[in-house]
Image (tube, rainbow, N blue to C red):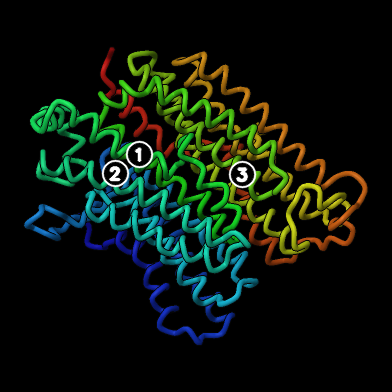
Amino acid sequence: MNSLPLLSLIVFTPWAGALLLALFPRLSAGASRGLALFFSLSTLALGTTALAGFDPAITTMQLVEKHAWIRALNVNYHLGLDGLSLVLVLLAGVIAPVALFGTTRTVRQPSLYAALFLFLQGSALGVFLALDFFPWFIFWELSLVPAFFLIKLWGGPGAARAAYQFVIYTIGGSAFMLMGFAALYAATGTFDFGQLASMARDGALAEALKSLGTFWPMMIFLGVFFGLAVKVPLFPFHTWLPSAYAEAPTGASMFLTAVMSKMGFYGFLRLLWPLFPEQLHAAAPCLLWLAVAGVVLGAYAALKQTDVKRMVAYSSINHLSYCLLALFAVSAFHGRAGEAQAAALSGAILQMFNHGLSAAALFFCAGVLETRAGRRGLGDFGGVRTAAPIFAALCGISMFSSLGLPGLNGFVGEFLIFRGVFGLAPWAAAVSTLGLLATALFLLTFWQRVFHGPAAGAGLKFRDLEPDEVVTLLPLIALMFALGLVPQLLAGLINPLVNAWVFQLPLQ
């Protein structure tokens, strides 16, 4: 236990900022932006404080806060931090202030926009830190509210439909997950993730679930699985994502793809994998095919897009499917070489962080194109590199990071994933390389048609980046180089945890 509730401060400080902005709606636009940026930066400041006191060698939860909440239901307010949580807290701490700084200047009603954004930020942080299902699920569901209004009120022409589709899909999946955990509670009497994981390791959870009926363990697994699969999203539960990301305002798109999409895969690692190892092992061979489909079909769908934002949205499906590919390969073949398992899982966590940087940068670049020209089709531009060399350089670095160019951050996670998956399921790694090929094709096509060739269309008088836009991209670009050249900065936080996970895997 800790005298300073650092994790609570990480979660609720953005909410405090949202409350202040809601209580003082008549603040000037500049004051609203400054206040929002201050409270958003709190996550990075407090996350760095947590990092300073974090010991990667300790693979159990650190900075734990636990207080009884609803005694009759054995519900606790329970927060904790390990390497996985810390990586995602730091990601949110980087992306949220960058997205707010880069976009609040151009939106209408900046005070309301920033308040909703801070509410979304705090909700996502609660998901990454809560260790009891009851508060965890509250944070999970509350994140939908600001995301819905950000898309609907500040989005594009199809924003209303995209916002409703996003909420309906996610709430539908959450209903299955809620029923699954209600059954878990009926069998065990606890919502605590640590207790449930401990019961799963010693076989007590499987025995408790079987007491409900022979078919219940798999049914509960499927309920939790559907709730998480929609959020990632796993193919074919992905159909809400392209519209939601494409219609959302730029700042919301940056946060949705960089942080909120990671909530689903985080749930796979925190809930599904430790609580249902037998069921996941049984389903993993089929799920591995779905992950491969997401890698390959997501990339080829991006290749067919003419809308830049939809292209980046499908690219997110492709990149997040790499993470699922790693997890399902380890789950399906967990009795094989430990090095391959560790490489795959380490790569998946690194991929979450690295994809967040590159995807957020690309969505911001797409927003710049749309803001300057009022359109964002691949055929609407030409020769932008000549008119806007700074923008072309920064966008190009972001694109090559997403492509996985050695020396940039995107390479490390993808290399480790393929290194691990090839050692476990060579056929899955081989087929998934088609996704790498398609990724290169659609990103280089985007680069060629928008930035090269003779100046045409909206590229004729394209204005280069303004100072605040350069400042928005520079932190992301700097991290792309830093983590590409010194990946141990991030890998060192998670390697002991991943090794502990691999050591706990049962032998086949």
Q: Is residue 206 left or right of residue 50?
A: left
Instruction: Give the SS element for disc 1.
Output: helix
Visible residue check, residue 429 = yes
Q: Quadrant of the N terminus?
A: bottom left
Q: Is residue 136 left or right of residue 477?
A: left
Find residue 128 and report its horizontal and vertical position in percent. 35, 50
Res 8 → quadrant: bottom left
Find residue 286 and report its horizontal and vertical position in percent. 40, 22
Q: Are marks 1 and 2 in contact (CB under 8 Å)?
A: yes
Number of residues whose C-alpha sits closer than 10 Å to that of mark 3, classed few (under 14), some (14–19) or many (20 or more): many
Number of residues whose C-alpha sits closer than 10 Å to that of mark 1, classed few (under 14), some (14–19) or many (20 or more): many
Q: Residue furthest front?
A: 161
For the point 18% across and 55% down, the residue is 66
Whether residue 234 is situated above or below residue 393 in the rendered picture = above
For the point 72% across and 64% down, the residue is 371
Q: Which residue is mark 1?
A: 226
Q: Quadrant of the C terminus?
A: top left
Whether residue 286 is situated above or below residue 35 in the rendered picture = above
For the point 22% across and 50% down, the residue is 132
* Amino acid at the residue labelled 1: Phe
Q: Which residue is mark 2?
A: 176
Q: Earlier in the sequence, mark 3 or mark 2?
A: 2
Q: CA distance from mark 1 to mark 2?
A: 7 Å
For the point 10% across and 38% down, the residue is 187
Q: Earlier in the sequence, mark 3 or mark 1?
A: 1
Q: Which residue is mark 3?
A: 480
* Amino acid at the residue labelled 3: Met
Q: Is residue 34 left or right of residue 405?
A: left
